Image: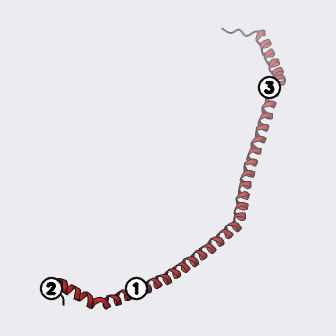
Amino acid sequence: MINFDVTILYQFGHFLLLLIILNFLLFKPVLRALDKRNSTLQGLTDGLEKAKADTVDLEKGYELAFVEKRKPIMGTRDSIIAGANKEAVHVIEKARNELAEELTKIKSGIEAEGKKVYDSLMGDVGKLSAEAAQKILRRSI
């Protein structure tokens, strides 16, 4: 059973005195250190958020600058490709025309050669016919 006497009052007094001393020597410095740490962390977090925002802005600026610097290069490239395509078409047309002319010359040469062969064979038809008839009949005609 609990006895309520004067020692309880002494113990209560000592407890209050210890609480006051610990409040000044331990609790307040620890709470100040925790507040200082929280404020430092908050400052670092704010700095990190600002750095992230700056990074995003710099990235957007870089992309815009990249696109702007790339436009003249792409325009030049496109004009060079268009000129090369025109030149290629011109060369192909020139080659096609030259081939057509050469094909016409070859056809006319073949026709002339065929005409010569035909004329020479027509000149020899009588002679060849007589020789063929002699061989078939086995006597001279």
Horizontal and vertical percent position of residue 83: 63, 74
Horizontal and vertical percent position of residue 30: 79, 27
Q: Looking at the picture, does residue 2 appear above or below residue 53?
A: above
**Residues at discs 1 and 2 in contact (Cβ within 8 Å):** no
Tag 1: residue type?
A: Glu
Horizontal and vertical percent position of residue 92: 54, 77
Where is residue 109, by image quadrant? bottom left
Disc 1 from disc 2: Cα separation: 34 Å
Q: Dot 2 corresponds to which residue?
A: 137
Mark 3 or mark 2: which comes first in sequence?
3
Please state, as top left, top right, bottom left or bottom right, where the N terminus lies in the image: top right
Q: Residue at x 82, y 27 (%)?
A: 29
Q: Is residue 76 left or right of residue 90?
A: right
Closer-to-camera residue (4/121): 121
Mark 1 or mark 3: which comes first in sequence?
3
Where is residue 118, by image quadrant? bottom left
The mark lying in front, picked from 3 and 2, is 2
Disc 3 from disc 2: Cα separation: 146 Å
* SS at mark 1 in the image: helix
Label number found at residue 58: none
Horizontal and vertical percent position of residue 39: 79, 38
Q: Dot 3 corresponds to which residue?
A: 27
Q: Dot 1 corresponds to which residue?
A: 113
Q: Residues within 10 Å of mark 3 (few under 14, many from 20)?
A: some
